[in-house]
Each structure stands twice: as structure tokens, then as C-alpha cells.
Image (cartoon, helix red, strand yellow):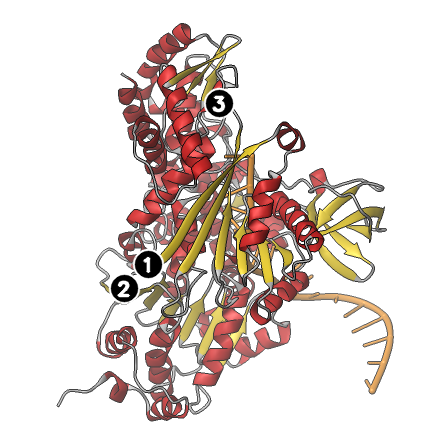
DNA sequence: GACCTGCTGCGGGTTG
């Protein structure tokens, strides 16, 4: 008789499952138990909800660690993107391990130094950790880390999709290589992910070395019913001038949120604040019991926690939020998901929609609200007549309904994160020879596309910046600036952040505003859905001391540009040139789409003459190809302005057409194009690099030549 | 016309 997955588990774990009254293991859990305990290589577990994935990975792992403990070493790492997720897993794992002797430890920024020392002094069991804290473990405790990780067998990566295609993911991959090198045995990775994007990219991430096998288990959930509506509104002149949402939109939103818990995603933190305040006012005036709260990354954690708690506990609540509530944090079942404006991506819209109707048999409810300029006449601004935000929202909606989502992008020449990893590895090892650093970080590490000569150029550049210093023996050690970088709090993360001022009301921390654009004493602003006036700056100049006061407008936050995938852009063109109508779009939306199509027929697309000697070029291509086309024009001496969908040339239509034709030749010279891409510094440590390295980096992973060529061909 | 995430060790003083 063959062993059942259940019988493979340690007796203590079997008894625990019995205590918890688990009647049956789920199919994904059975597969994972067999793959971990009987198989070899890495494992990818893909399933759309968090329920059961953590147990699928850890039942077999803690079972194995209890029966065969790793002497004096941590047996498994659990790496996650959020402290809140690690804390949640910590509780579940501790509970799972009550009957077996497998210690569970936590290490992240909120964990007391004392508890971290317990890991260093008496390592064992499972360690839950963030990538940044793993970096600090390796860099600040290199000697101990060797012992702590000497017999490491597993690294479980939670929410793997949150790392794919990001600088943080590249850092994590490099850390996994460094950790594997410290250990004695084979390190097996277990990736947990929602069924997002490209399973192939997730599989590639887990295959640390070329020959490594990855077993993939995917649990497909049945199609859930989706109730979906797209509402469009026309902005009045006042709305445009005051940069606010139309009253009709806000009124409908309040009305739709009356019947239970709602999450409404807005396009910026500023919009979260204004919409929350406006909705509260409308609901109050109408005597409705529903309350509106704000939730975004610039609010104090305590305040965010209170909103999350209220969302779990109450049903007469709507929360206006940015992407903070898109994944991770458990806020329970939500009746309605709202989206104000076109979503940032289809992937994000899928995640957001998934927040609704999580209980069996309950449909998901999604409503998208788009405000467009009222621009039906021919003397309206030409680009306004195309209603591009509405068209983008419909494009994203159709792709959502077709089940398509953006695959993660890959960066093949991330010299910024490589710089961090060089500093980290040199600090960890106390120095290193250039060829060894290249082998460990690049040839056999997370940066395989960086060849020896480029690596040598990078080292020379870091030498000039005094990040590194070469000793007579040829060994590299940290230079003066390198030492400063390594000992700064900002070193551990791969992504950059802006400096912020705390906002305090008495002893209570409300949130944060960027230093560069923070309000002055006497000025009023909205934060956490309330209006405040700045009374003073505190003595150290690190906090704004505020008091409640009416009349505040949304504060200014800093942000980059939005990225669009080429497929969304191409779908927008198809919608404008086609005739299809959509049952999910309301009457106003249908009328505005027809107006946009009429306008479209009156323009010599892809060019739109703007009058005043300017012409807009709408290539309908992805963001990276757009930047490639902009660089192509810049290489001919034409500076195109405009963002998102349009490149605006300071030329009348005929000359614009010729300028584009003439500039097209530059597509054959990627190095020249790369030199014209702005801004040149895209990543955290790019300010340390010289222009030559930056241009090489852009040439290798900052251009989309294929997308640019395709956009040019369609023009013909 | 964007959003989110993360994060020291150590010396010196005070208290029980």
C-alpha cells in the first residue's frame, strides 16, 4: 500500500490536524506534501486565494524539521513582502507547531533586538523574515549568519508575484544565492503565488541554477460570477478648474456604498483624501448611516490599523484607498469594489476585483467610475474629444473579462541593485577579489547578464565614488562612502524613498507628507479624511504640529509616471477604430465612446493637429516603447512633451509627419537612442553611476525597439 | 497623471 500524504506527516502534526478538526487535506496541500517530502528540487504553488497555501508549504516542512532537526541551525526561512503578512503567518505557524518541537522565530523592523539575538544565539526551526532584514542579518552578523544558516534546507517565498520584475525581487534572488552559498546542503525553494501574470517567470525565478528542477502545482478556482458596471460622467467647468470629481459621480458612489462594506480604489493619495471627505459630507447631509474612511501609505500605521479593524468589524462602512488594500492584509469579505478612474493596470484591477465576493456563491461586484471632459463640440480641445481615460478604462475592462493580465517585466541590467549587492557582499565577507565577486553575484548569481568587462567598469566607477577601495593585494574593501552607505538605515532596501515630515495632532501621529512639498504654518490640508491647519513645526523640524480646522484641500504627494502595457494601448486603438458596444458601459459612457469615435474619424490618426502649430502623435503603444519613440525624436533634435498616450510635437501636422519619418532611422542605433532617454537615473543607486554605465543600462533594458517599430509600421 | 513595500549597532546613562 502506498503512503497517503497525511501519513507522511509527523505524528505530532497529524494530531494537531485532528485537534483542529480538519476533515480533509485540500488537493494542493496533498500535492505539496508529496513534492516536499518525497520529491526533490524547487516547488511552485499557485492558487488564487491565500487560504491553504501557507499550510500546504509548511505542513511538510515543519514535519520534516521535527523528525530530523537541523543541528544548531535554522531549517527553513519564510520570506514575505510585508511585516503584517509575516506576523499573520507567525501566529498560524506557532499554532501549527504547538505539539512538535520546532521553534518559530520572527525578524523584521518591528521585532525587538532582544528577540533577534535569540535567533543568533540559539538558531533553529523556522525564521520568518523580510528581504531587507535578511540583508541586515548577512551584513551586520556575518559570522553568526554562517552558523544560523549552515543547515538551511528550505526558503519559502510568500506572495512571490509581488517580487517578480522588481528591484526588490532582484535583491531577494541575490540574497537567496548568497544564503545558499553559506549553507552546506541543497537549498530548496518553495514559491507561493496567486495565479497572476506569467507562471513561467515565477518558475524561472525559483530555478536558482540552470539545471534546477521546479515542480509547479496550480489550483484553478472555478469561475466566479462578476457583476460589473462602468459609469461615466461629464465634468463641469468648475470641476475641471477645481480638479474635483463631478457631484453626480460622488452621489452615485455614496448611493452604491449604502448597502454594505465597500472598498473604493482611487488613482492617487490626494484623490483618496478629497473623495473620502466629499462622500462623508454627502452621506451626512442625506442622513445616511454609511461612514467613509481613507486608507493609504502616507497615513500613520495606527490609523490604518483602526480603519482595517473597522472594516472587519462593521458593515456600514466604505473605505477609499490607494493600492494599500490591494493585496495582503485581510479585511474580510467586501460587498462592492469601486474603482475611480482607469485602473493602473489590468493585473491591479484583477487583484482589486478579487477583494469582493470571496464567500462561496457570492458574486463579485465591481463598479468603475470615470469622469471625462464634456467635449462634444469641434472647438473643444482635440485630445479631450478622444475621452482617452474612458477608452483606457473600457480597454482594461475588456482585457479583465478576457482573463488577460500583464506579465512582469524583466530588468537585465539593474546596476543599481547590483551596486547594493556588491557593497553587501564585500561587507559580509570583509572584502573580496573582483573575479570572485563577479562569479558569486553575476556568473553564478542573480545578475547573469552582466559580463566581466561591464562588471569591471562598474567596479572602477564605484572606486572613483569612494564606495570601494582596492588594496595592494587586489582585494576590494569598502571605501569611505561605501562604509557610510552600508551603515545608513537606508542601505537595506533596493528601492528608493522620499524624505517625509511626520504630521502630529497632540500626541497622535496622523501620517506623513513629503518634505519637498509640505504645507507651511497657517496652511490647511486634508489627511486621514479630516481637515487640519499647521500650527507649527516641531523643534527638530521633523514634524508638522497640526490642529483641526475646516477648509483643507488635498495635500501634494510626489509620484512617478504610470506605466502602460502595449496590449492595453493597442486595445484602446481597436476600441476607437471599431464599432463594438459594451453592455457593462452605462448610457453616458456609450455616448462618450461614440463621440470619441466621431472625433477619431475627423483626425488624420495617429496624428491629431492641436492648432497653435502643435501636433499630438498617438502611437498606441506601451510606456517603454513610448519613451523609445520620444528618444528617437530627441535624437533628431525634437523635444516631445506629453505623457501617457500622446507625444506632443511643437510642429504643424505636415512637418510633424516628416519629423517622425526622418527620425525613424535612429531606431537602428540603440546606443544613440539610449543616450537620449530622460531621465537617465531611474533607480536608487543610479546617482552613483557615470553616464557611460547609465546609457549601457538603458540600452539593455530601458528601450522597447520592437514596440517602437510596430508603432511606426501601423502609422503607414 | 501612480501606488506600494522595507530598515542598524552601539555606547553611555539610569534604574532596580
Is residue A646 in view from this perspective?
Answer: yes
Give coordinates of residue A649: x percent, y percent. Answer: 47, 15
Write down the residue under mark 1.
A195
Q: Which residue is mark 2?
A: A220
For disc 3, the neighbor class at 10 Å (few under 14, some 14 to 19, many from 20) is some
Closer to the observer: label 3 or label 2? 3
In the displayed structure, does residue A228 sit left or right of residue A420?
Answer: left
User: Where does the image place residue A672, in percent across and percent down from the top left?
Assistant: 38, 21
In this rendering, position of residue A81 left or right of residue A715: right
3 vs 1, front mark: 3
Judged from the image, the secondary structure of the residue bearing numbered disc 2 is loop
Compare residues A404 and A466 and report the one nearer the observer.
A404
Mark closest to the chain's N terminus, 3 or 1: 1
Question: Residue tagged by mark 3?
Answer: A376
Name the residue at 64% across, 50% down. Answer: A279
In the foreground, A514 or A305:
A305
Amino acid at each position: 500500500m502506498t503512503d497517503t500524504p497525511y501519513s507522511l506527516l509527523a505524528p505530532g502534526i497529524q494530531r494537531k490536524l485532528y485537534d483542529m478538526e480538519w476533515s480533509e487535506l485540500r488537493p494542493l496541500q496533498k500535492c505539496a506534501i508529496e513534492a516536499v517530502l518525497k520529491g526533490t528540487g524547487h516547488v511552485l504553488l499557485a492558487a488564487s486565494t491565500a487560504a491553504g497555501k501557507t499550510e500546504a508549504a509548511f505542513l511538510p516542512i515543519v514535519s520534516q524539521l521535527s523528525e530530523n532537526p537541523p543541528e544548531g541551525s535554522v531549517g527553513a526561512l519564510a520570506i514575505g513582502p510585508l511585516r503584517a503578512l509575516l506576523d499573520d503567518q507567525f501566529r498560524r505557524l506557532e499554532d501549527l507547531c504547538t505539539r512538535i518541537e520546532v521553534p518559530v522565530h520572527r525578524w523584521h523592523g518591528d521585532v525587538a533586538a532582544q528577540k533577534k539575538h535569540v535567533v543568533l544565539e540559539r538558531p533553529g526551526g523556522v525564521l520568518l523574515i523580510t528581504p531587507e532584514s535578511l540583508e541586515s542579518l548577512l551584513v551586520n552578523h556575518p559570522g553568526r549568519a554562517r552558523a544560523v544558516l549552515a543547515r538551511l534546507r528550505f526558503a519559502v517565498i510568500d506572495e512571490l508575484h509581488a517580487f517578480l520584475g522588481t528591484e526588490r525581487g532582484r535583491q531577494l534572488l541575490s540574497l537567496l544565492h548568497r544564503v545558499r552559498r553559506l549553507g552546506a546542503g541543497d537549498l530548496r525553494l518553495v514559491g507561493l503565488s496567486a495565479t497572476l501574470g506569467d507562471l513561467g517567470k515565477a518558475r524561472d525565478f525559483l530555478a536558482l541554477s540552470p539545471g534546477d528542477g521546479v515542480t509547479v502545482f496550480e489550483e484553478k478556482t472555478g469561475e466566479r460570477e462578476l457583476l460589473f458596471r462602468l459609469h461615466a460622467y461629464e465634468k463641469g467647468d468648475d470641476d475641471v478648474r477645481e480638479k474635483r470629481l463631478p457631484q453626480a459621480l460622488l452621489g452615485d458612489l455614496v448611493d452604491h456604498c449604502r448597502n454594505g462594506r465597500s472598498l473604493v480604489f482611487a488613482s492617487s493619495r490626494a484623490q483618496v483624501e478629497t473623495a473620502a471627505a466629499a462622500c462623508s459630507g454627502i452621506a451626512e447631509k442625506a442622513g445616511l448611516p454609511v461612514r467613509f474612511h481613507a486608507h493609504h501609505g502616507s497615513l500613520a500605521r495606527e490609523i490604518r490599523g483602526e480603519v482595517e479593524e473597522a472594516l472587519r468589524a462593521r458593515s456600514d462602512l466604505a473605505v477609499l484607498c490607494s493600492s494599500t488594500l490591494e493585496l495582503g492584509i485581510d479585511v474580510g469579505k467586501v460587498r462592492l469594489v469601486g474603482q475611480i478612474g482607469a485602473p493602473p493596470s489590468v493585473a491591479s484591477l484583477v487583484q482589486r476585483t478579487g477583494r469582493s465576493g470571496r464567500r462561496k456563491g457570492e458574486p463579485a461586484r465591481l463598479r468603475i467610475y470615470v469622469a471625462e471632459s464634456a467635449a462634444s463640440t469641434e472647438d473643444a480641445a482635440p485630445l479631450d474629444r478622444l475621452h482617452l481615460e474612458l477608452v483606457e478604462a473600457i480597454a482594461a475592462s475588456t482585457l479583465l473579462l478576457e482573463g488577460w493580465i500583464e506579465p512582469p517585466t524583466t530588468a537585465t541590467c539593474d546596476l543599481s541593485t547590483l551596486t547594493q549587492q556588491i557593497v553587501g557582499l564585500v561587507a559580509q565577507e570583509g572584502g573580496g577579489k573582483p573575479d570572485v565577486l563577479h562569479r558569486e553575484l553575476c556568473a553564478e548569481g542573480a545578475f547573469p547578464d552582466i559580463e566581466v568587462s561591464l562588471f569591471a567598469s562598474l567596479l572602477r566607477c564605484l572606486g572613483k565614488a569612494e564606495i570601494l577601495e582596492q588594496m595592494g593585494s587586489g582585494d576590494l574593501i569598502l571605501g569611505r562612502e561605501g562604509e557610510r552607505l552600508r551603515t545608513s538605515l537606508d542601505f537595506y532596501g533596493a528601492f528608493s524613498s522620499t524624505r517625509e515630515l511626520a504630521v502630529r495632532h497632540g500626541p497622535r501621529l496622523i501620517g506623513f507628507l513629503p518634505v519637498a512639498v509640505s504645507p507651511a504654518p497657517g496652511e490647511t490640508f486634508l489627511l486621514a479624511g479630516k481637515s487640519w491647519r499647521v500650527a507649527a513645526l516641531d523643534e527638530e523640524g521633523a514634524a508638522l504640529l497640526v490642529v483641526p480646522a475646516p477648509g483643507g484641500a488635498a495635500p501634494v504627494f510626489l509620484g512617478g509616471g504610470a506605466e502602460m502595457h502595449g496590449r492595453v494601448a493597442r486595445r484602446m486603438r481597436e476600441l476607437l477604430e471599431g464599432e463594438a458596444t459594451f453592455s457593462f458601459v452605462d448610457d453616458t459612457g456609450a455616448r462618450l465612446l461614440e463621440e470619441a469615435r466621431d472625433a477619431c474619424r475627423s483626425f488624420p490618426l495617429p496624428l491629431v493637429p492641436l492648432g497653435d502649430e502643435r501636433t499630438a502623435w498617438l502611437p498606441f503603444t506601451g510606456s517603454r516603447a513610448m519613451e523609445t519613440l520620444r528618444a528617437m525624436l530627441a535624437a533628431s533634435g525634437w523635444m516631445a512633451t506629453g505623457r501617457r498616450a500622446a507625444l506632443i510635437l511643437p510642429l504643424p501636422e505636415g512637418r510633424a509627419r516628416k519629423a517622425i519619418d526622418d527620425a525613424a532611422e535612429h531606431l537602428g542605433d540603440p546606443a544613440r537612442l539610449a543616450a537620449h532617454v530622460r531621465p537617465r537615473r531611474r533607480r536608487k543607486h543610479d546617482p552613483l553611476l557615470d553616464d557611460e554605465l547609465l546609457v549601457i543600462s538603458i540600452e539593455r533594458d530601458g528601450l522597447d525597439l520592437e514596440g517602437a517599430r510596430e508603432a511606426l509600421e501601423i502609422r503607414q
